[in-house]
Image: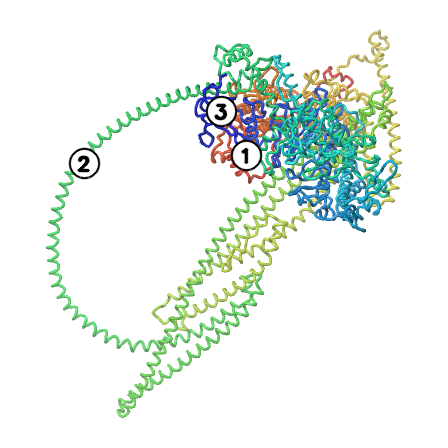
Amino acid sequence: MAASELYTKRARVWIPDAEEVWKSAELTKDYKNDDASLQLMLEDGTNIEHKLDPKTKNLPYLRNPDILVGENDLTALSYLHEPAVLHNLKVRFMDSKLIYTYCGIVLVAINPYETLQIYGTDIIHAYSGQNMGDMDPHIFAVAEEAYKQMARDERNQSIIVSGESGAGKTVSAKYAMRYFATVSGSASEANVEEKVLASNPIMEAIGNAKTTRNDNSSRFGKYIEIGFDNRYRIIGANMRTYLLEKSRVVFQADEERNYHVFYQLCASSHLPEFKNLRLSSANNFLYTRQGRSPVIDGVDDTKELCTTRNAFTLLGINESYQMGLFQVLAAILHLGNVEIKDRDSDSSIIAPNNSHLTAFCELVGVTYQDMSQWLCHRKLKTANETYIKTLPRLQATNNRDALSKHIYAKLFNWIVGHVNKALITNIKQHSFIGVLDIYGFETFEINSFEQFCINYANEKLQQQFNMHVFKLEQEEYMREQIPWTLIDFYDNQPCINLIEAKMGILDLLDEECKMPRGSDDTWAQKLYNTHLKTCSLFEKPRMSNRAFIIQHFADKVEYQCDGFLEKNKDTVNEEQINVLKASKKFDLLVELFQDGEKATSPTGQVAGTGGRTRLSIKPDKSRETSSKEHKKTVGCQFRNSLQMLMGTLNATTPHYVRCIKPNDFKLGFTFDPKRAVQQLRACGVLETIRISAAGFPSRWTYQEFFSRYRVLMKQKDVLLDKRLTCRNVLEKLVEDQDKYQFGKTKIFFRAGQVAYLEKLRADKLRVACIRIQKTIRCWLARKKYLRKRSAAITIQRFTRGYQARCLAKFMRRTQAATTIQKYQRMCMERKRYKQKQAAALAMQTILRGYIARLKYQALLREHKMVIIQKIVRGWLARCWYKRCLYSIVYLQCCFRRMKARRELKKLKIEARSVEHFKKLNKGMENKIMQLQRKIDAQSKDNLLVVEKLHSLETSSTAEKEKMRNELNRLRGVDEEAKTKTKQVSSLQEELERLRKELSTTQQEKKTIEDWAQTYRSEMEKMVSELKDQNGLLKKDKDDLNRSIQEQSQQMTEKMARVIAEETQQLETDLNEERSRYQNLLTEQRRLEEKYDDLKERTLASNVSKPGHRRTDSTHSSNESEYTYNSEYAELEEGSRAAEDVTRGIDTSLTLKLQKRLTELEQEKQSLRNELENKEDQFQRARARDDVEFKKARGAELEYESLKRQELESENKKLKHNLAEMRQSLLGDAATNSGAPGSPAYKVLLDQLNSSCEELDVRKEEVLILRSQLVSQKEAMHHKETMTEPSVYVVDVSKLKDADEIKQAYVGLKDTNRLLEHQLQTQRRGHDNEVEALRGELQNVKEENNRQQQLLAQNLQLPPEARIEASLQHEITRLTNENLELMADDPTASREARVIILRRMVDLMEQLEKQDRTIRKLKKQLKVYSKRIGEMGAGQTEGQTSPGQMVDEPIHPVNIPRREKDFQGMLEYKKEDELKLVKNLILELKPRGVAVNLIPGLPAYVLFMCLRHADYVNDDQKVRTLLTSTINSIKKILKKRGDDFETVSFWLSNTCRFLHCLKQYSGDEAFMKHNTSRQNEHTLSNFDLAEYRQVISDLAIQIYQQLIKCMENILQPMIVSGMLEHETIQGVSGVKPTGLRKRTSSIADEGTYTLDSILRQLSAFHSTMCQHGTDPELIKQVVKQQFYIIGAVTLNNLLLRKDMCSWSKGMQIRYNVSQLEEWLRDKGLMMCGAKETLEPLIQAAQLLQVKKKTDEDAEAICSMCLALTTAQIVKVLNLYTPVNEFEERVSVSFIRTIQTRLRDRCESPQLLMDTKMIYPVTFPFNPSSLALETIQIPGSLNLGFLTRV
């Protein structure tokens, strides 16, 4: 394929970039072969010119199509190169938040630096049993593949986890081991898998530390072998460690820490058990403070130490050993703080009594003098003499540090050894899976011996990896029969030879270490001389003579020679070791050094100078090694251990996990391309890509290729043979035959060919889209044109009509205007005429009126003059009359006032009467007395005022009387003056004086009238105020009524809502309790099965006699619960053999299981009791609440009506008073009504006084009631919240102080309610007492009825049964009496017990004698009847004698018998019980004989046998029959529990047997639907309620087993049928696949489809219907089936990126609609099964809806209510377009969804729980079948049963 065909305009390429490593660009111009550059446009719109290399002419890498970006497998990419790999990883990591990606056989894991919810148990179960390519990449998928290959290929496996520090190697290895522990389980009761996982915290504490790159970096390599038995269950593990970094014990770089365990001890130093270690803060010790970072954010070292100690305990390291370990670690810390000082230039000294050295010596049990001496001295040995040499301070310090490292290394090895001992098991190991957690390739600025060893190990691992990849490629080509050529790949054997071959680097290093004066410089010169000219991989730096460069597979690394020899030797002072060995107080320390090393140990070192140091330890071999091995150098030991590791790996099937560190700053989901590319090159991922790209990386099955590229074929190219079709089409599309190869099942493509085919497919689809668009646009344009043409015609028609209407309108308007003008002109003329006429008339009128008025005024003046004269004369006469009348009226007023005062006094006395106030206000005596005192005081004041007014009136009256007398006298004098003219002058003077007095009196009268007017206005104002107050009271009354109604309505609604919520909560609690109870039954059944398996294995190993069968000693746990003794084992086999076999069982294990079973039974019984109590409590509470609510509501309404009536009466009274006042004020306005003595004044005064008194009374009431209300408010509130939630309390604090009447009303109401509540409490107590008495009375009645029934039943029984029943009754009665005596008097009870026992023994002996007599008589009766029959037959056959004919009457032989009336019972003998159970249960096959039976026939037969045992009152027979039945059902289910028909058959029969026990129990609740005949068949002697519970539990266990059986059958079908199979063909296309095999979405032969699921569901349904399963139970089973289908489908959808597309959403919705149609056909739409599919439906809708704008996000949030936030985000992250026309979901849109859903309260669990089983119920379903009509077919072999 020419480059011009690929590098065309709009083609996208990758170009190098300094920052992003690779940058995407797009061609703006086609490339031609002669072009020297490419015209490109970057993604930001910048146009650049990319020049090509003139020598190579290499074009930039092409970019893959967008639909291939984000693939699970990097080998699925069409263009395989570095930028494609980097971009794919970045897109998956940054956009989709996916940290795992396949690269061929390698799993690439990128550290997210965040906690992800993808490692739960639900995820583990989701990956269990799945093929590696079927699910999204995950560490669990690799672990499952290893586990599966181990089981399938019988070959050991290895998982190699590598990567640099901080990449997540340890976590990945930990999750892999967790997967094995969860999936496989343990082969013993020792919980080995927990111990394997418990080793992780221990190894992390002693082998992990904080570095600048990782907070929990493993500073050693480890290889853990997890052993499995022949059933592939974990039996143990073994750990090997490599290259512990001992130098970290004594030195840490900045921002780093020592090993975690040191900081854990320092943080826990305050604990009492650590006081003797003398520890303190980590900053006080040299070995823990050098990094200046003692704390890790988010880590609590104290809690971590607790975890470590718990792990030690779990692994069998006791407390004393743990304290010994901590003692050694504390000693190391103290040793680091020992200060060594210079004595002189060649010697050093430790100050005496050094506190830290003293602490060290006390902790390890050595002497201070010896240790201080050998820390500063060294012993030298020659051939003849021994010298002690002093050490300078620097060497002594190094000597101290070397000892610390040596002790820690010994301690590390000891812990690893004990961990291995704890993980070793006695069970034979069948296979193992190894997990290698080892360091990756490292290169730093200064690289020393540690980096050299690490990179050497990675060279070996890379070589093994390359060979394995090449081998897999070769096997694939050979399997597909494709001709292949040798693939050229990088072979790093020369580099390995340079390191480990003879005269290699390690060999020369060991040789130099043996030289007496060997140094790093001489070793470097030897390297230069040996390899510089002979090996191209070895180089010398230009500027250094103490370094060398090695070309590794990943990169060139420069190593500094400084310290290589010392680190390789790894020496330690022998005398120091001898001092530690001599410790007599510390046994653990001696145990650490018991291997007897002498001079040189491979576990210590002298500290190097500069850079990082990481030292080796010896390989993890057995402890007893020879002294020769001790003298091996570190390099030699590491080489040997590495060779052993490679041998182990080569003997296993490897699986690779490459961990990538995305950035150096530990930022969550941040991707640094430079660091990622560096690690990809170093870990071999790109080498895998290169090897794959060198061959045929893209592989398609013929079916997948046909489905994907069907659009490139013509109709004539499609043949029946799809392989031939693909071959023909591919030859036409790709001309170069070398670009592809045809295998047996697949087509292999070279790199880039899939992209080319995708380009052709996209072009074809684009052309088709353009054609479709053209056609549609043409159709739309024509449709638009026709619509416009029609619209234009319509517009024209309406326009012309409008114009015609406008013309007609104009003509009408013209005619109308002419008419209007005519009439308007006529009106104008007429109006002008009228105006002139009116003006003339007006002038005439005015003139005539003026003349008339002049005449009238003259007449009027004359008339007024006459009137004035008349009025003056009359006035003079009236003045004299009024003076006389006034005097008379005044006298009358005085008299009437006197009478009124007397009447007022009587009224006041009556008003002050106590009886009167008692009638008005009952119960207000105290308040009346107070008010009476106030009234008396006010009365006194009023009396004083009245007396004052009375005195004024008296004086005025006397004065007036005096003046009147004087006037009379003057009149007499005037008369006399007529006769005596001499006295005229004196009389005139006296008259003047009287006139003055009269004027004074008139002024006083005027003053009194003004006062009366003022008083009247004040009273009117008071009346208006009272009127306003009355209006306010009325308004308050209305508000109160309205608020009362609203509160009552709110309280009613609240009560209804609370009752509904409580009902719902109780139902939820009931379901939860039922679920817990059924889960306990499941656990009990699992323990029983485990117990049976253990017994079987124990019996199989202990039984030696060949003729013996294993005794089935399995007893039902239900029997132990109800203390029923099983006799089934005694019937089947002898008890002696069972006892002999049982002795072989592990006693401790048996006791443990029995204890566990007992606990489960007790918990089950408690849960059952609690469940029943809750149900009863709920019913009682509901009934009580209803009654109390009705009572309280009725009393409250009655009280409120009374209060309203009282307020209305008060209101009427006030209105009446106001009316009286108004009438009195408006009475006689003309007269002097305002005078103090007037009637209006009196009425007004009386009403004022009464109003004041009433107001004072009301105020006092309000004050008293308010105080009562405040005191009662808290009590009422407490009553409401604590005891009586239905009591209503009004929030009085909201009322205003002015609304006193309202507050008074509320207070009275609360007081009344409190009294009513107390009354109701007393009433309830009384009702409870009455109910208790009624219960006792009912018990007495029941006892009486029971005695009568027993008497009647005994009379109906035959004599022998009557005797037995009477004896049984007598035993029961005596037992009850015994119990009563025990409660009363223990001494008397013992005596009575002896008497009763003797009496019982006598009765039993009599019973046995009578039984023997009855059996003997029955046998004789049978013999006699047989003889009589023979004699009768002989008489009929022979001839009779004449005498006989005459003397004896003739007896006919065949007497006709009427048909027997059966009672619906079956009789059997005791010895036939085993045969009954065997034929009816154990050997009955549902597919054979049982198909033709009546549904539930075995249950009916068993119940009829039980009825007969009840009829004869044989309790032993009832017990053994029920026990045998239960055990037999359990046995057959254990034997054939995987057969759905068997489990369904016995579930149906068990339920029917349970219903029969209920239907014929005699309980009225179960006998409502019985016929009269069925009621006669009820059980008469035994109450089997407890056995009903046992059988109900058995039915629950069978139901759970049925669900498990269905799940096992449906599980393989669900994913294939619901997700992978294309029900609607052609909707979804198949995307390119990688090396990992992915299940095809095209239905091949043998794959499951949706029809397979529907057929299986129909088979389940028909089987259950055929077996007569209850309809309600069938609905529950179907609901559980659909839940399993929905949960498994959704879980797989969430874990498969290739399934999250628009087309797959359509397929899922169609499949769900088919399931709903199936439900509709079966009539099961209302069973709740459809609701269980709601999460799956919403996930499918989420795949299809628009996902761009905020409106779309809001719609998604409102639509996906059944999905959790994690599930919604996961689906959006996994959404993958199948075609180029679809768009990916943007990251911003996903963030918007997360923001909108962050307030949801839900669990963070991603997957649905597929193991969840809804709690099952068994509604009572009585049978209409009459027992006496049941016929037993002969095929059951039950001929020994007799119908009764």
Q: Position of residue 489 (x, y in %)?
A: 62, 20
Horizontally, residue 1205 falls left or right of residue 665, namely left
Horizontally, residue 1155 falls left or right of residue 1331, namely right
Q: Residue at x 61, y 24 (%)?
A: 687
User: Which residue is denoted by mark 2 in the rendering?
Assistant: 813
**Contact check, label 3 and label 1, Cβ < 8 Å:** no
Q: Secondary structure at mark 1?
A: loop
| C-alpha span from label 1 to label 2 | 69 Å
User: Which residue is denoted by mark 3 in the rendering?
Assistant: 52
Q: Which mark is residue 1522?
A: none
What amino acid is at disc 2? Arg
Q: Secondary structure at mark 3?
A: loop
**Contact check, label 1 and label 2, Cβ < 8 Å:** no
Nearer the camera: disc 3 or disc 2: 3
What amino acid is at disc 3? Leu
| C-alpha span from label 3 to label 2 | 90 Å
Horizontally, residue 1461 falls left or right of residue 1148, namely left
Relative to 969, residue 90 above or below: above
Q: Position of residue 1288 (x, y in %)?
A: 57, 50
Q: Quadrant of residue 478?
A: top right
> Which circle's residue, 3 or 1, is located before the other in the chain?
3
User: Which residue is denoted by mark 1 in the rendering?
Assistant: 1761
Q: Which of these two is toward me, 1416 or 1652?
A: 1652
> Which circle's residue, 3 or 2, is located before the other in the chain?
3
